[in-house]
Amino acid sequence: MTRLRKPVRSPHPVRPFCEAAAQQPVAPIDFSYGQKGHGHFTDNREGNLGSATSVLKSKVRPGRFYVTGYQADSDGQHQVFIACLDENGKPDTTFNGSGMVDFTKLSTGNYLNADAVAEDESGNLLVSVSVIQESTTHLWKLGAKGEVDPNFGQGRGYVDTRDLFGVDLVLEKLACHREGAVATALRREEGVFKAVVVALKADGGRDSGFGEEGLLAMSNLIPESPVHILDGIAVIASKTGVQRIVISTYVNLNGDDHAVTSSLSLRGSLDETFGDKGHHWSEVGIINNGFTVEDSSERITLYGQHYSIDDDNSPPTLYRLDYQGKPAPEFNNGQVVRFDIDGAWDHIAEADGSLIGYGSFYDFAMAVRYTSSGQLDTRFVPPHGYGQFGAIVPQHGFYSYTYSMIIDTEKQRMLVSGEDVQQSYRLPCLIAVSLKQAR
């Protein structure tokens, strides 16, 4: 599949892992979770290969955590799954009797991976599953007990996006609202896959009142740029209860990188009261990896990196907008916060009045905690506010390439999805970083 990709903005070569390990503080692992801080939920037989691609904390059923991913064994058997774990990292057997749904057993589709999951207000799940060597996505709907919804997708329990829209169409990120669901996607146009937003009704039919018969092309929304790569999508609700869609897009304008955050109505029309006529444009050089939203504070948190060709560096970046698309004044006076080690933040979210997450630094991962004003919270990994976790290339251990984590505020831990790489296997895995602060 031919698709546009963001440029890799890294001015420095990968450092030897021993140098990286010696220079960084270490974040604490919560060894009370799973098996010594690692959540395993598949067989660890020799030759097994897999990864956990995303993790989601249920907002409807406290103590439930959903993990998507895949695993293949040495005999050629392939699992594409969503697992349901409890707060201790163990399978929740109230979900499908085993704590897992294997989509390869539900369909004759030749599945590659379960890529993303979203939860609606009733606790039902939408799971996007990619198909091997096919430019389509099967979007499944499951009930809270792991059962397939027979009323979704014309009785099949899933929607084939290519069949539904009559064009090669691959879903990426998902979000639910009261009337249905939206997703970032790639649609084939003249041999190249280009960014669109997709809208579906609650029964899996296309939402024809959204954009053009359920599809909104980013080239129409931001025509100034020839390049559009969607970083994420979310549904926000104001204190009056009105829901809107927020998207973030990488664009390149006259050779300059920008991150554009936009607000849409549930019908796909641009909300021109947001930002500058519907958009907030970042400063030059910002390349976001995604964003998170928090209705209680009405804040949008955007994270990634800033590449400066003049300074020859690429520090991780973090900035916040309010729900009107304006820079949040309490966060670093509305300015971007830069970290002083080259890399990029992969996922950061608001929790307990702080901003917590992690990022990638070429050959290792780092957890971080900021205050709501944009300062490093030095009670986390004191006196730094950040620390390395997982393995360091080329060691065995935990690695994450998923840009996905959740915060378990009750247990004071961050769960990051990824894989446990050992000599004879690579398993889907969550790692638990302890967020308990020094007092």
Image (cartoon, rainbow, N blue to C red):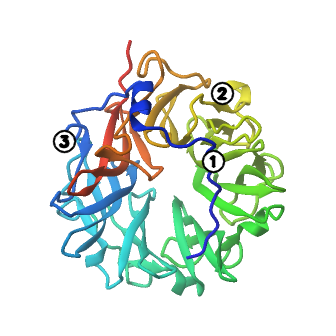
Q: Residues within 10 Å of mark 1 (few under 14, many from 20)?
A: many
Q: Nearer the viewer, residue 82 or 145?
A: 82
In the image, what residue occupies the spot 21% across and 33% down? 32
Q: Amino acid at mark 2?
A: Phe
In the image, what residue occupies the spot 48% across and 38% down? 15
Question: Tag on residue 331?
Answer: 2
Question: According to the image, label 1 marks what residue?
Answer: 288
Q: Secondary structure at mark 2?
A: loop
Task: Assign the C terminus to one quadrant of the image.
Answer: top left
Residue 430 higher or lower than 353, as above or below:
below
Residue 178: image x %, image y %?
54, 60
Residue 124: image x %, image y %?
39, 62
N-terminal label among 1 and 2: 1
Q: Amino acid at mark 1?
A: Asn
Report how far apart the C-alphas of labels 3 and 1 lie in the structure. Answer: 33 Å
Report how far apart the C-alphas of labels 1 and 2 lie in the structure. Answer: 18 Å
N-terminal label among 3 and 1: 3
Question: Tag on residue 205?
Answer: none
Q: Can residue 274 be spotted in the picture?
A: no
Residue 80 higher or lower than 397, as above or below:
below
Foreground mark, 2 or 3, reads 3
Q: Quadrant of residue 35?
A: top left
In the image, what residue occupies the spot 67% across and 79% down? 213
Question: According to the image, label 3 marks what residue?
Answer: 35
Q: Amino acid at mark 3?
A: Gln
Q: Secondary structure at mark 1?
A: strand
